[in-house]
Image (cartoon, helix red, strand yellow):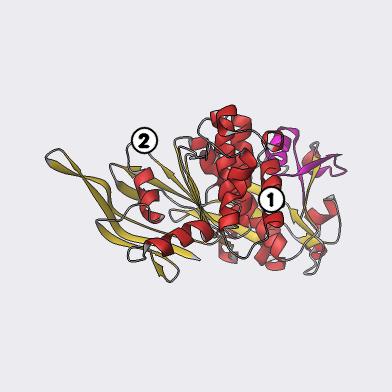
Amino acid sequence: MILEIHELSKEFANKDKQVNAVDKASFRVKSGEFAGIIGHSGSGKSTLFHLITGLLRPTSGSISIDELNVNTAGEPELALMRNQKIGYIFQEQCLLKNYTVLENVFMPGILCTGKSKEGIREKAEKLLELVGLSELKNSYPNEISGGEARRVAIARALINDPEIVIADEPTGSLDPDNSDIIMKLLRKVTDQGVAVIISTHDLSVLKYADKVFIMKNGNLSEKGSVVIRTASFEEAQELAEIELACFLPEEAATLEQIKSRLRAFPYHFQVAYLNHKIIGFVDGPVTDDDKISDRMYADVNVHKEEGSYQTVFGLNVLPEFRQKGFAHRLMHHLIKQAKREKRKAVILTCKENLIGFYEAMGFQNKGISNSLHGGAVWYDMELKL
């Protein structure tokens, strides 16, 4: 699935002048990509989403979803698109006040022909469990809080397994814990092949995005986007310098060790590339060992193409690019690759100060590791796939 807009504009009349709510916006999002749009209130984000979903008609420009031309599609076709292709999470929630929370979630599924009502109801209950609202399934919209209503709207948007999820301020009205629940859910949906587009004021949620756009006065521009690709042998020196910037000298891999890894398992040596510069990398062999050992660091022959476990030797991002979500993106990329290759788990060791970082991504702390790498205390972490 590819969503593409080109030179998209929407003008509104404001007294005696025309206002460009969206001004020649262009972008492209495909299946399995997470795009975040940041901008102040009134910058045009909601108007852009209404145009993409066919709720508004553009003044000029084009919108296409695969072979569907949204500009020229009729209302019945657009309604079917919104029901089956797009899960739209409105900023205002838009729940039906005379129906229960559960009924609000499964309503779009009932309207989607060819699905059993029992199956849809069961799925709706599972989605409510995912967003932490099982106990409120028989409540009505006027009996729940604004934050709870937001989570109901998110569950409803996922009921028909959409190809695209569009979320207008999905974490608005939510506390940090519930915001994390929702963003992890949207990231999980992305990793399963859905295109996700969100608007937000909350910069902290952008760590989950693959690409970021800035909207200002109707103009849309892409913020520097990171590209993740396989490392080349010629980049060994640059990778060694990043390693030294991230670890103590006694813990860092040497240039010769990095060259050895690049020869042994190049496909599992991924770099993050931003504005013509490598800003970080993740690497590790595939092995049949279920825990990291000091032997692995010394012997690249532990790499087994058909091994059960994907290891992580290093998840390294230059200090000036930390706290910007690049480490999350590198790790998500490696996890997706491990899933495609049908590994049992991703395993790594980390220091105590990073346990929370990995636990937030779903890793389980298995306790103090037997590894004595660099003379430090390490903890075994495991993410079952």
**Res 245 quadrant in image:** top right
Where does the image place residue 190, in percent across and percent down from the top left? 59, 54
Q: Residue at x 27, y 54 (%)?
A: 9
Query: Could you say whether the residue bearing mark 1 is in a helix, strand or loop?
Result: helix
**Gap in Å between the C-alphas at discs 2 and 1?**
38 Å
Residue 121, numbered circle:
1
Q: Residue at x 71, y 34 (%)?
A: 135
Q: What segment carries the magenta color?
A: 346-373
Where does the image place residue 11, in percent across and percent down from the top left? 23, 49
In the displayed structure, 151 sits above or below 280; it is above
Magenta stretch: includes residue 369:
yes
* Residue furthest front as drawn: 98
Q: Residue at x 53, y 36 (%)?
A: 97
Magenta stretch: includes residue 27:
no
Where does the image place residue 222, in percent across and percent down from the top left? 39, 51
* 2 or 1: mark nearer the eye: 1
Query: Which one is in front, 371 or 102?
Result: 102
Q: Residue at x 56, y 64 (%)?
A: 234
The amino acid type, in three-letter code, at marker 2 is His
Disc 2 marks which residue?
40
